[in-house]
Amino acid sequence: MRLNDCDPGFKQEIARQPGGEGIKTCFACAACTARCPVGSLKPEYDPRRLIRLALLGRRQEVLSSPLIWLCCSCQNCSEVCPQDVRCAEVLTAIKNLAAKAGHAPPSGSAMARQLASHGRLLEVGEFENDKRAELGLPPVSEEPGDYQALLGLQPEAPRPAGEEA
Amino acid sequence: MGGCLEEIIFLSALDTPVLIIGGGVAGLAAALELDRRGLPSLLVEKGPRLGGQARGFCCKALEACARCGACRVGDLLQQAAQRPALGALTQALAVNAQRQGAGWEVTLIPQESRQPDTPALALERPLRERLLARTGAVILAVGHQVFEARKKSRLGYGRVPGVMTAGELEEALAKGGLPGQARRLAFIQCVGSRDQALGRLYCSRVCCGFALRLARLARHLEPASQVTFFHMDVQDYGQAWRADLSEMRADLRFIRAIPGEVRPGVGGPLAVFAGPDGQPQEEEFDLVVLATGLEPPVAAPALCEMFGLAPGPHGFLAGGGGVLVAGTAGGPRSITESIEHAAQAAAQAAEYLLAAPASPAGEVAHA
Amino acid sequence: MPKPVLCWTPAPGLEGLEPLALARAVGLELDQGGALEAAVVTVPEALAPDRLRARLLGRPVQWLDLAAELGGGGDGHRHKRAAAALSRAAGRASLGTLPAVYAPQPNQRVLVAGQGLSALAAARQAALLGHPVLLALRGDDPAAAGAGEDTSQVAELAAGLPEGIELAPPTELTNLTGAGGSFSAWLKGPQGALRQRFGAVVLAPGGAWEMEPAPAGLAPDLARPLSACDPASLATAQGWRQVAILAGVGQPATAQGFARALTTALALQDRPGVQVTLLFREALVATPEGERLYRQARQAGVLMARLADGEPRVADDGRTLAWQDQVLAEDLELAPDALFLAEEITAPWPGFLQNNLLWPPLARLLPEHARLDGGRTARAGFYVLGALRGTPAGDDRLAEAAGAVHDLHDLLGGGATPLPAVRHLTCARCLTCVRVCPHGVPEHLEDHIQPAPAACLACGICAAECPAHAIAPPGWSTAELVEGLARGLKAAPSPAMVLMACGQSAMPAFAQLSRQGHVWPAGLLALPLNCAGRVGLELILRVLSLGAEGVLVAGCHDGMCRSITGNLRARLAVGQAAQTLKDLGLRPEAVSFLHMANNQPQALAKAVEAMYARLGAPE
Ligand SMILES: Cc1cc2nc3c(=O)[nH]c(=O)nc-3n(C[C@H](O)[C@H](O)[C@H](O)COP(=O)(O)OP(=O)(O)OC[C@H]3O[C@@H](n4cnc5c(N)ncnc54)[C@H](O)[C@@H]3O)c2cc1C
Ligand code: SF4
Ligand code: SF4
Ligand code: SF4
Ligand code: SF4
Ligand code: SF4
Ligand code: SF4
């Protein structure tokens, strides 16, 4: 890979995102990698590697990588990082950029649609409210309007605009 | 001072051109250098013995000297013993300082302490009663504080059996040998240094050197042992070190990664670190050694207030107004570097006295 | 022959011993305060009462640290050990010492040759201590700073030079002989070469930047030194986008060189549109601000690239660098618009230091040695400071200069041990002493050997090597040692063994163990030496022939001997003695050598124990 073909502005862009500020100070000590629970389940996943790719300016590769979506924001990495990179937040910032660039995974978009149209991730229908009534619980109602207002969406057009993980 | 130390035990005040606070290598070297210039001084140490933290360190020579400097403590103590004019007050703590003209009046109070098993040297005299030292200049040689390894709780110190600090390993090796049947050793570097999260954004300078020398010594004492060295960078200590380092690179396992966790395993501590493939990897060791860094001395804030000093870089001490700093009190340095640093502090103290307007203590200096 | 008396000065550790009984046992009078010819004192000189010291001035005295030689055990056991030690000392004291033939005074002048911080600081301190100083600068501007030095700090020092400093016209030191108190220096200046005498010499050349070697195959026009980079004016003007800085690639950088590279990288990265990549092997951050700079540079966006051996590779075009990224394990390439190579401070060794005729050659005076701090070299009175020694520019140089000046002041003021005595009538002018003295003390002047007045450390190497018994530091001739040991061995219970203990390593450890109450075998006789180098084949064999059943020589670790090779010479002598014993059909195990440091008392205790076990009759 030629560094001349990479995008030096990418790291600055991530650093401008809320939560992404720390990315540039990573000095690759790999403490985060050692602590990441996802890494021990999914061999390809390595937070340090993702940060390194971003630092090298490999925008396309990072934003389109399915791996960035595996971070479960458990903050294990942030706890051990000696440079205060706040790796979990950095990955969130990267996810946001990826979503903006249209790389959100289908499951993510589906969830966003769900949220936009129902106000929650689980649809609440008559079945649920009947069960609740049997248990003496009040019914719950879906109020997607709140979310739509919050996300600035048209009520009928549940399209994902951003993934607040 | 040695001649009159006997008497000052019964005095409540005394004059001395230079008061040296702290009897580690830096304090001892400062007293020696002043004596070489012909200036008397009073050395005060809060503990029962001189020598400071380096006193318990081990010799790291294999076939040849590893230039660790640890035996320089013994050299200094011996040189001090051969200079009749030198003496030291032990178990003496400076609690108050008052500006007097260009000099200082420092109140020393006796400190209770457990008596160590080594008998006192002839030049060590415990302070028995409160004493007022009137002095023309002060050298602060109070040393450093070793990073409290418990603060890096993930590395298991105090919690996981088999995890120890490098200082503890130094002492174990000085006393006899490797603790237990340690065959699989791991060193973890930069514990408490180079760490923005802890507010310690500096390199402690000495730990790469002592850790690798200890590692090599451990390999030498127990040829069947394996040493893994978890680090980020290896600092440089000159030409001869570079030659040693290339040998060490061939003999020890260098891993450029800092483990994220040390937890109890079946046969010893289990370190979790990033393997070469970027995946968390676990490995069991018999002994995990933490290369704890150097922190500012605990007494730094109190001393700054006593002598009206502005805090120095990274919270270490910086001198001013007839107060000089020597050794690790002023920042991380090795034993030999502390000795040289003390020479400079001694020279500056002497210059300060020359320039200072006449004061009771200053007159002693000119006499 | 002077008749020694026993001056019993009580000290901790001597409790329970009967001075009168001991004096009688070893055939000495106990001091009654009368006139003294010679004396054995039970405490070291520093601890003796002032009045006693005054009474003993100029007489042959054996200062013992008796408590430190005794160790623990029952009263009877300690009495026996004390008797042997006192006998040994009485033997030496009764011989008196060889008088120094004549003792010239050390020259007080100090030559400081060099430039910049180290030279000015050394000159200043020496002058403040009252030494006449000749400051021989290479150029004619005293305020000229060495590479990497703070020019304002240097200018301030140059402006405030105290009285007592003579400024030589631009001068070069071209040759040097002699040692502490008496150096001859050849100075070449505008008036030609002239030779002057000095008591001490400080060499502190300023140092210059040297670019680290470029990786093989790099287009020559691409590689430029870091100092050619003025970030403020260069970067935007030339439209650079990618800049590479190599800092510690071909050979390891120093922390100072690395910090300088970081500073430049930071400044360049701040220019709009510029991306800096810093290539290095190790991040050398061991300076007070090193780690902060390293973080600041990353924060600003400088890309850090770690390299392995043999990297970076240069492509055929001579302009593209390639290496493997250590995190990604994949190859990266960079074709920089500009490339800078970091620089390190160097100073060439002056030619005269390459003189290999004498041992040690002057260039080898400066091994990396944990005892030679403060600019000290193996030649007492000769100091090498600053760039030539690799000391980082800044306060470290001031500290080093201060150490050097304290040392020379101490030496020239009489802090060195007395002059070695040369018996010119027996001297064969074989020049062995000139060759073996590690501190350059004996000098061959016209027809005789003349020791330099302020340089001898009484290591005794000359005394061990001189074939004619013609030279020895006072009190350390073979005759004196053997006479003392003969009496000590007579008083020592069998099996008697002699520990020849180096004063820098074995003796302090021995004393420490004794103070802690370690019980030494009753027949063990400690012979404290200034340096193991005093031990020669002859001394070992004579001690064995006096009835010692074993000899253990203990000296410093290889590389830690204050006299550079004293320990190795002693080890060699022990090997020769073992071979001799073997050839004679005797037990070679009767002699052995131990390398140790003063913080390894356990090693000494173990070696003594092993020796007694080998001798077959442990107590
Ligand atoms: C684990 C470890 C290993 C190391 N190994 C090496 C090595 O192998 N080689 C090497 O060169 N360096 C080594 N170092 C560094 C070395 O410890 C220091 O360089 C050295 O101890 C500094 O000496 P000092 O005199 O400045 O301070 P200290 O040794 O800390 O001495 C300070 C003295 O001042 C006294 N004191 C403190 N406060 C007061 C007060 N208020 N009043 C009176 N007295 C006071 C203390 O009791 C102490 O005796 C190591 C450091 C650590 C942490
Ligand atoms: S722990 Fe922090 S500094 Fe270390 S590799 Fe991870 S993000 Fe980077
Ligand atoms: S927050 Fe993400 S990257 Fe960090 S440890 Fe958890 S899963 Fe791994
Ligand atoms: S410097 Fe260190 S290694 Fe060398 S002899 Fe002294 S203690 Fe041993
Ligand atoms: S000396 Fe080595 S171990 Fe110590 S802080 Fe510096 S880099 Fe880390
Ligand atoms: S070694 Fe002895 S004989 Fe030879 S020159 Fe020196 S003093 Fe004379
Ligand atoms: S005793 Fe040692 S230093 Fe002195 S002259 Fe002899 S060899 Fe040189």
Image (cartoon, rainbow, N blue to C red):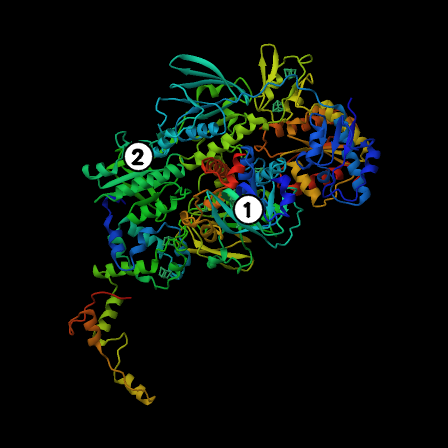
- What is the three-letter code of the residue carrying label 2? Leu
Residue C226: numbered disc: 2
For the residue pair C599 and A152, the one nearer the viewer reads as C599
The quarter of the displayed image where residue C152 is located:
top left
Secondary structure at badge 1 equals: strand
Q: What count of labels does the image hold?
A: 2
Q: Are marks 1 and 2 in contact (CB under 8 Å)?
A: no
The quarter of the displayed image where residue A105 is located:
bottom left
Mark 1 and mark 2, same subunit? Answer: no
Q: Residues within 10 Å of mark 2 (few under 14, many from 20)?
A: many
Whether residue C585 is visible here, answered yes or no, is no
User: Alpha-carbon distance for marks 1 and 2?
Assistant: 52 Å
Secondary structure at badge 2 equals: helix
Q: Which residue is mark 1?
A: B133
The quarter of the displayed image where residue B29 is located:
top right
- Read off the chain for label 1: B
Q: Quadrant of the C terminus of chain C?
A: top right
For the residue pair B169 and C78, the one nearer the viewer reads as C78
Give percent across and percent down for residue A33. Answer: 39, 56
- What is the three-letter code of the residue carrying label 1? Ala
For the residue pair C207 and B210, the one nearer the viewer reads as C207
- Read off the chain for label 2: C
Specify whether C554 is left or right of B182. Answer: right
Q: Quadrant of ligand 4?
A: top right
Q: Quadrant of the N terminus of chain C?
A: top right
Whether residue B12 is visible here, answered yes or no, is yes
